[in-house]
Image: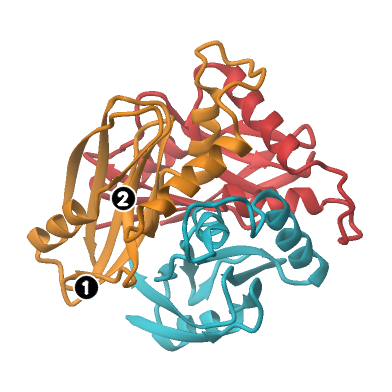
Chain colours: A red, B orange, C cyan
Amino acid sequence: MIKYLEIYTEKRTHFVDITDEIKKLVEESAVLEGVCYIYVPHTTAGIFINENADPDVKWDIENTLEKLIPWENNYQHLEGNAAAHIKSVLVGTNTSIPILKGHLLLGTWQGIFFAEFDGPRTRKVIVKIMQG
Amino acid sequence: MIKYLEIYTEKRTHFVDITDEIKKLVEESAVLEGVCYIYVPHTTAGIFINENADPDVKWDIENTLEKLIPWENNYQHLEGNAAAHIKSVLVGTNTSIPILKGHLLLGTWQGIFFAEFDGPRTRKVIVKIMQG
Amino acid sequence: MIKYLEIYTEKRTHFVDITDEIKKLVEESAVLEGVCYIYVPHTTAGIFINENADPDVKWDIENTLEKLIPWENNYQHLEGNAAAHIKSVLVGTNTSIPILKGHLLLGTWQGIFFAEFDGPRTRKVIVKIMQG
């Protein structure tokens, strides 16, 4: 089963918690054991799994990435969003989470975040759920 | 087949070689061709594949990550372990390795490391082996 | 189906676009729906997905990684290529792309790059295509 999520980001850097949407798709798939693949078909965005309890964690991740890979830094790419491409490479554009008894095996504190690095934009996330 | 490994880390940052445990699970699964998924259900730890011959490589990885993402750096997250969350995002919490003829297709110098960034703790790793 | 690509890199850091080779393998597999896993069995190389339209993007990624993880930086590892190991850990050695109707679900601007960090060398990439 392959499904698409549409995501509306509101800032240049915006980490959107998509955990509930992904959980719903796993439930609808009725797959009891397998793997859920999440794939971002963009070159200036990514996907990561981390804490979704304290919003300060998101802020620290965003701020540290900005310090390491500043928006302006004498890049060659003329579109002005080179930093977003580099962050996408380091954070990654896909992840895989095991499914057991119909549920994602996320840890207690884990949430799934779409990472916008060049927003605001309308984005897509591809979710594939495989039985096995 | 889904199995859990329990891992005991001994320092704040501790890279634990779990290659032999994963190989054993692949052997026990009797899967001849497929994929082995390794998933870390924690938000201050990760998983990576790299050289397990010279221990200095581990030291250089640890030390460089610490320079890039220092433990103390005016983070907002009040628990004091923001750096561990950020390292987890950059290193990643999951990996997938193909299986052929009953063996992981690891390269000659590759080992699988559980990466503790906020230890010491007792941790879990989820291993899913899928035939196909 | 598991296949190997052989890749010849020409510089110390060299990002080689392997999108067409991977697309060809997906076509040959005749898998209509499934997942394509790409796995790098090396410890000083990686794999990433990013823009393959403007070559300046590659240059910015290479240059920023070099600034963050300089080739010389008082590393302990005596072989002199510690930076390549660290870049491999951060960029990652594997990726998974969903397949639908016989095609990789790559985004419009996405290409697949083998990332050499310690070349020039002859390298391998393992491609596994799973139906499901």
Which quadrant of the figure has residue C31? bottom left
The image shows residue A52 at horizontal and vertical percentages of 51, 24
Residue in the image at 60% along x and 77% along y? C19
Circle 1 is placed at which residue position? B33
Left or right: residue B58 compared with residue A9: left
The image shows residue C48 at horizontal and vertical percentages of 58, 63
Q: Above or below — where is A130 with respect to C24?
A: above
Q: Is residue A36 visible?
A: yes
Q: Earlier in the sequence, mark 2 or mark 1?
A: 1
Across and down, in percent, residue A14 comes to: 70, 33
Q: Is residue C129 left or right of residue C5?
A: left
Rendering coords of residue A111 (x, y %): 47, 30
Q: Chain of mark 2?
A: B
For the image, the number of numbered tags is 2
> Where does label 2 land, which residue?
B38
Between circles 2 and 1, the one closer to the viewer is 2
Q: Quadrant of residue C51?
A: bottom right
Residue B117 or residue C93, whichever sits in front: B117
* Amino acid type of the residue that numbered disc 1 sits on in the rendered structure: Glu
Question: Which amino acid type is marked by label 2?
Answer: Ile
